[in-house]
Amino acid sequence: MQTSVFLRAVSLALSLAALPAAAAGQQQPASPAAKPPAPAVPAGVPLPSDYVIGPEDVLVIVFWRDEKMGGEVVVRPDGRISLPLLNDVDAAGFTPEQLRATIEKAATKYVAEPNATVVVKTINSRKVHIVGNVLKPGTYPLTGDMNVLQFIALAGGLQEYADAKDITIIRKDAGKDRPLKFNYKDVSRGKNLQQNVALKPGDTVVVP
């Protein structure tokens, strides 16, 4: 009889010990739902200080809450880009920050408090041209700061019979062509360095 009483006491003690663990399992709060991961933002190219978006530039538009609204786009010749829901958006002539503000304003029709990022993936709109007596005439991308002397070197240098003293940079200014003179021999010798101007998109260097 003593053995039976002892076994019942042990069984009761084990039952009581299991109760707190079960109660704790029932009362344990559910873990909060995981927040959706932030969308990956690709790295862009270094931007010149005076950069504005232009035709043929490749952009990546990323929306924080709705990735389907963004994507990779190419600026069309008319200066616009096409985005889901937003359709056509003016882009050329804007800085990336200005375009971001324009896109977010347009997106308020579809998303509460939209948060967009504009990344410049490739710059194709900034171009300079060189014609005449250089080894490699043609059109070149202007992706950073470059002066006339550097550009001539990039184009392979002057040919043997080039008129090095009478080179001209033709620049668009208020819709009109403005010629800038460049004496290669002077500049290469460290003289009249003010002629060695920084090139701007659309400039054409003429080497007679």
Image (tube, rainbow, N blue to C red):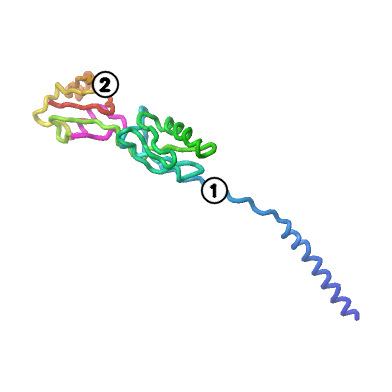
* Residue 41 versus residue 166 in the image, above or below: below
Q: Is residue 161 left or right of residue 116?
A: left
- The quadrant in which residue 100 appears is top left
Q: Nearer the viewer, residue 49 or 67?
A: 67
Number of numbered tags placed on the structure image:
2
Q: Nearer the viewer, residue 153 or 144?
A: 144
Task: Return the x and y of residue 67 as percentages of the image width and height.
Answer: 46, 45
- What's the amino acid at mark 2? Gly
Q: Is residue 151 left or right of residue 37?
A: left
- The quadrant in which residue 84 appears is top left
- What's the amino acid at mark 1? Pro
Could you classify mark 2 by the number of other residues whose Cα lies within 10 Å: few (under 14), some (14-19), or many (20 or more)?
Answer: few
Residue at image mark 1: 36
Q: Indicate which disc residue 175 carries.
A: 2
Q: Which residue range is magenta in the image?
A: 138-155
- The quadrant in which residue 75 appears is top left
Task: Return the x and y of residue 206 as percentages of the image width and height.
Answer: 17, 26
Q: Is residue 51 visible?
A: no
2 vs 1, front mark: 2
Q: Is residue 127 left or right of residue 32?
A: left
Magenta segment includes 177: no
Please tell me whether mark 2 sits on a helix, a strand or a loop.
loop
Which numbered disc, 2 or 1, marks the residue that appears first in the sequence?
1
Q: Is residue 77 visible?
A: yes
Quadrant showing the N terminus:
bottom right
Could you classify mark 1 by the number of other residues whose Cα lies within 10 Å: few (under 14), some (14-19), or many (20 or more)?
Answer: few
Q: Nearer the viewer, residue 40 or 49?
A: 40
